[in-house]
Image: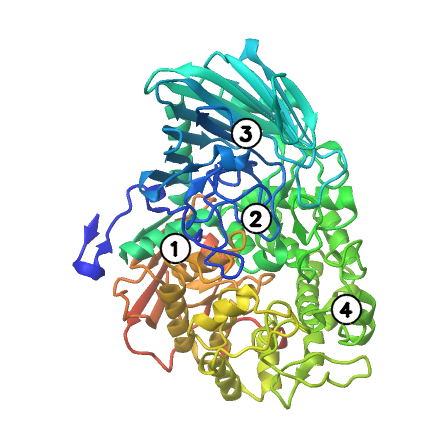
Amino acid sequence: MLNGFAQDVYVDRVESPVDWVNPLMGTDSKPSFSNGNVYPAIARPWGMNFWTPQTGKMGNGWIYSYSADRIRGFKQTHQPSPWMNDYGQFAIMPVTGKPGFEEDDRASWFNHKSETVKPYYYSVYLADHDVTAEFTPTDRAAFFRFTYPGTDEAGLVIDALDGGSFIKVIPEENKIIGYTTKNSGGVPDNFKNYFVIYVDKPIESVHTFKDGSLVQVSEQESDHAGAIITFSTQKGEQVHAKVASSFISFEQAERNLKEIEAKSFEVVKEEGREIWDAMLGRIEVEGGTVEDVRTFYSCLYRSMLFPRKFYEYDEQGNVMHYSPYNGEVLPGYMFTDTGFWDTFRSLFPFLNLMFPELNSRMQEGLANAYKESGWLPEWASPGLRNVMIGNNSASVVADAYLKLGQQYDYDIETLYEALLHGANNEGPLTAVGRAGADYYNEMGYVPYDVGINENAARTLEYAYNDFTIYRLAKALDRPKEEIELYRKRSLNYKNLFDPGAGLMRGKMKNGEFMKPFDPFKWGDAFTEGNSWHYTWSVFHDVEGLIGLMGGREAFIQKLDEVFDLPPVFEESYYGFVIHEIREMQVADMGQYAHGNQPIQHMIYLYNYAGAPWKAQYWVRETMDRMYKPTPDGYCGDEDNGQTSAWYVFSAMGFYPVCPGTDEYVMGSPLFKKMTVKLENDKTLIIEAPKNKKENRYVNKLWWNGQERTASWVSHQELMQGGVLKFEMSDQANPVRGTGNEDFPFSLSRENK
């Protein structure tokens, strides 16, 4: 229901939140500039398999680009980002006319005006073939419906892709089986994705594809295998295909097909719609603009995709998984396709708040990953990948246990053992364990001149990771000396603060700061950012950072400078302008680079220095300007739910600045009312009845009727349910939230 006029139309009630989702948000992207770098993921929440229309060529990480005009197939995908690329992938494509297997030969023009895109359903008219293609997925299967013209040359292409594949057509059963091995790394030698397809139309002829040639045989195994089946159709005739896959076996793929069984296409489609509506409906919003509501539910959808399920069910219904670490089929849960460098910040805290049972299973999966590989993954896709930095599995594990406690039974002792192992050893890949662990443990930082790249960023992240280990060690009642060791290490961030520059800076092995120092230089000592971005990566001890900077006024001034400075940059470390730099440059927010993760929490740090109104201003400014429910809707890579979860939390009015603590730091809520249905059957109501675009400042705040001046709220309080009420204003309140007792947690203030 809508209320209002012109651009100020407000949505009073959302009947079906899935109808507000735009899966195309962020799809207008390219390697040199990201508006999200996502594809329309047609899936169930956290489904093992996603499906998407494919506009890019085979192997191109940009599977679907909004600016494209031809579709080459409909692809089963497990791709977490274009930079990681895909695995376990194959494509199907309806065709008419003379059989053509190659992706350019089978491609068809399409138009967005004849395209319907929902989280649970996709439909498009393929002009060159005069075919309407539709599909709707389950977790491990999918149902396709193709409406053909009247022709004796209707067909279906099944492309198992290159890199080693197999296809077999069994006409008497209207069945195709195959496997694909195409991947981008992170898999054992025996990796395969087995698939089975049933069509409800008698197969009249069969061609298979082998490395560039079509032949009339029914079975093919080669570097690049595929098939074309053909049949005659009447005008408007609908042909259905049921598809399922498994990382375990053909038999298991058949078992996974039972997710569809004898259901009709419309029943599976409606089930998907109901599941998404129920999940998205866990948060109901009222009193926002049409654009805000669309953006919110589109971001909420993106927050419910990764990490994906990587497990299946055996004949008795027991959970099992193919291990992407050792290649064995083992009991228990497994999840994958997430990079903790991105997602520890808000995606996993979002799961702890809204889906704690699911995250407890993810923790079981992490324990299994450690048992099967000897390490916790920092970037899994599907196994260990050598990407990004840090040891942020510590944050993911600690925050889950500290918030979930003993509500769920999983092996926290094994996970704690894994954290200690990762914190004190270099792994088999640079991105596993801690590169420079010995230097860090002995010297308190990773030196700039010992051949370890992005060393300052590593030091800052290791210090925060040590804080989360310290907090978990306390909760597990570990030996006192062990607890104190990690507390002490968590203060190592101080070793890189340069008082002269007032910023973090790389340091040489001899104890001197590296020279020359350009705070605008991206990379080098930092990761996908510069010193202005990484200086704030002291999530756990902002008070300590304030002290290093000379007090609250100096700290606030430094925060202000981020927005006041011009968006200049120095890119020589990369040799070209990486897309993250360009996204910062065009955003017109100075050095604030919301399109990448290192600085996304920075706005909330105003609360720690007694200037919460400045956080309120910039949070709303970022939500209003950096997010739109459109193909160019993000301001950089979406990154597996992280940038979306930032928006979801910020729309609630608070944000988890420091996972590993119990606190959320206050911002500025976006809607007049939000009803959050927690998994424990409690309800959290967030009210801001005077909210509108110009009323971005918090004048007063009440929790269950009691006025509060604190700039934080605890997880445990929220989990009990209640009413968080904001009085919003168009004028800043320079008094509220300025007392010492109002400031969020900092390690330097612990026990004070």
Query: From this viewpoint, is residue 51 visible?
Result: yes
What is the x, y in percent for residue 349? 54, 55
Q: Residue at x 45, y 14 (%)?
A: 201
What is the x, y in percent for residue 672? 29, 59
The residue where tag 1 is placed is: 722
- For disc 2, the neighbor class at 10 Å (few under 14, some 14 to 19, many from 20) is many
Residue 101 numbered mark, or none? 3
- For disc 1, the neighbor class at 10 Å (few under 14, some 14 to 19, many from 20) is some
Work out whether mark 2 precedes mark 1 in sequence or the reverse, and give the earlier one.
2
Q: CA–CA distance between discs 1 and 4?
A: 49 Å
The residue where tag 2 is placed is: 61
In the rendered structure, the answer to whether residue 507 lies left or right of residue 631 reads: right
In the displayed structure, would residue 510 be above or below residue 344?
A: below
In the displayed structure, would residue 574 be above or below residue 420?
A: below
Q: CA–CA distance between discs 3 and 4?
A: 47 Å
The residue where tag 4 is placed is: 452
Q: CA–CA distance between discs 3 and 2?
A: 21 Å
- For disc 3, the neighbor class at 10 Å (few under 14, some 14 to 19, many from 20) is many
What is the x, y in percent for residue 437? 79, 65
